[in-house]
Amino acid sequence: MKIIAVGWNYAEHNKELNRINIPEHPVIFMKPETALVRDNKPFYLPNFSNRIEYETEIILRISKMGKNISAKFADRYYDAIGLGIDFTARDLQNEFKAKGAPWEICKGFDNSAPISAFLPKEEFDINNLNFSLNINGEEVQQGNTKDMIFKVNDIIAYISQFFTLKTGDIIFTGTPVGVGPVKIGDHLEGYIEHNKMIDFSVC
Ligand code: MG
């Protein structure tokens, strides 16, 4: 399976990273399967970065193989949603950005993608979904999918021009404003609407 992620998909978040231009197309990157962490296992801070930041994101589970999917049929290709953290080594990312170099190491390192269990998509309006993250009991990030620059169906259509989507693939759909660093001892709890989706600690 593969993990495909969208960057810069919420305008207010782009401003906090000093990126003011609205992207013409979704900005896509990937994480390897070894990035996944499930079942609320702890996240171990890696020693190669001094600034690991959380990015809370709605994730999709692909349920059918597809290539060149049209946006109007894209909702047939995923069956469930969940919550994921796109952990990012921000210090390394800033170095790579300055050099115009690729992002893989800062985005795709081992355990950089903790994910929740999945919920059936039928129970939710994917284009009006509140989600949030608490750290140590304080809300640090809150978003709604209605603020996405590229909506879920457009993301699926765009990605599938380049990459055949396969059953079990996961798409991270981008993070809203409010990203920030984590440190050892932090306790992360993430929600979709009022459903607690993730609950794990940083070690
Ligand atoms: Mg992200």
Image: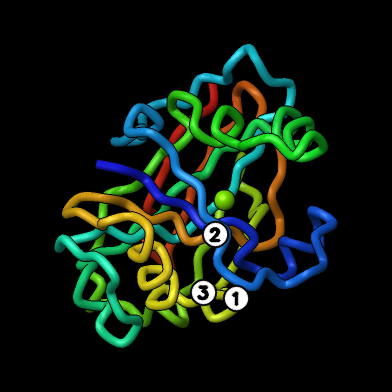
Residue 108 position, x and y percent, is 49, 33
At horizontal 64% and vertical 68% (from top left) the residue drawn is 10
Whole-number angstrom distance, CA of label 1 to CA of label 2: 10 Å
Q: Secondary structure at mark 3?
A: helix
Quick one: which residue is furthest to the bottom in this view?
72
Identify the disc placed on residue 145: 3
Q: Does label 2 point to a residue whose CB lies under 8 Å from ligand 1?
A: yes
Residue 130 position, x and y percent, is 50, 72
Q: Look at the numbered discs 1 and 2 and tell me whether their residues touch, using CB distance below 8 Å.
A: yes
Q: Which residue is mark 2?
A: 174
Identify the disc placed on residue 82: none
Q: Which residue is mark 1?
A: 149
Describe residue 104's horizontal placement relative to residue 114 as left or right: right
Q: Secondary structure at mark 2?
A: loop
Describe residue 202's horizontal placement relative to residue 180 as left or right: left
Position above or below: 113 against 109: below
Identity, as a three-letter code, of the amino acid under mark 2: Gly
At horizontal 62% and vertical 36% (from top left) the residue drawn is 102
At horizontal 34% and vertical 47% (from top left) the residue drawn is 116
Q: Earlier in the sequence, mark 3 or mark 2?
A: 3
